[in-house]
Image: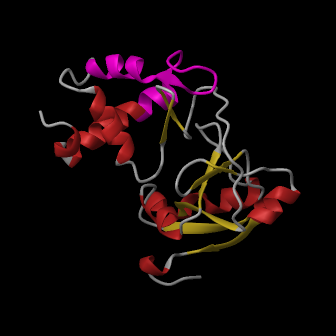
Amino acid sequence: MLVGERMDERTRVRISKKMTFLLRHKKGFVDKEGWVDIERLYEELRRYFPWIQLSDILYVVSKDEKGRFEVKNGKIRARYGHTIDVEVKLPKASEKTLYHGTSCEVVAKIMKEGIVPMRRKKVHLTASLKEAIENAKRKGNCIKILEVDCECLERHGHEIFKAGRYVRVTDYVPPECIRRVFVPKSEGREG
């Protein structure tokens, strides 16, 4: 098996997905702030990938464009996306506008109830329209983009935090903070 700089993309993605699962969803694996010793993660990953090297974990982290992982003082954690109870301390975000990609089928419900965390602990928004479109495409063929007014969120007491390169998280997005809903230009018309 090739490792590190020689690792093929398919293998990198498989390792990244397993790391993401362990760090976001496995009860009892991480501490209350989401951290685990890299050595412990390495030992757990060896159950699935017996050939893996410690350097492979760092390689996967270095190639993660979304900034899902954080490494510090011999420990690693997922920055966002948890379904287990953790208290990840993140810096505040400063954007005025963020986006949320979704399927056409749920827009009416969102406009009534707002954007809620669903299975995760936080609502995920993005600073990148391109990322919002990609996220929406995973939810179906008919997609819509919701433009979120961050100043409105702050006025309603909902803080926004920077969780990854483009990912921003908050506890809830009330319907009145959704500035507009549109079909992205790459999907046909905007409106």
What's the residue at 19%, 42% (across, down)?
7
**Residue that appears at 57% across and 27% down:** 34
**Whole-percent x, y for residue 8 in the image:** 18, 46
Front residue of this view, candidates 60 and 185: 60
For the C terminus, which image quadrant?
Answer: bottom right
Q: Is residue 94 visible?
A: yes
* Relative vertical location of residue 147 with respect to residue 70 in this rendering, above or below: below
Its colouring scheme is: secondary structure
Q: Position of residue 187 (x, y in %)?
A: 43, 76
Q: Decide if residue 142 is on the left or right side of residue 4.
A: right
Task: Give the left or right position of residue 139, taking residue 106 as reference.
Answer: left
Residue 107 placement: quadrant:
bottom right
Q: Is residue 174 left or right of residue 68?
A: right
Quadrant of residue 94 in the image?
bottom right
**Left or right: 51, with 99 as reference point:** left
Position in image of residue 51 (x %, y %): 18, 24
For residue 176, say whether it is visible.
no
Residue 108 position (above or below residue 159): below
Numbered marks: total: 0
Q: Quadrant of the N terminus?
A: top left
Residues 188 and 32: in front is 32
Residue visible at 48% across and 60% down?
136
**Any magenta on residue 180?**
no
The residue at the far front in this view is: 73
Q: Position of residue 46 (x, y in %)?
A: 27, 19
Vertical placement of residue 52 versus 13, above or below: above
| Residue sitting farthest toward the left | 1
Q: What are the residue bounds of the magenta stretch?
A: 20-46
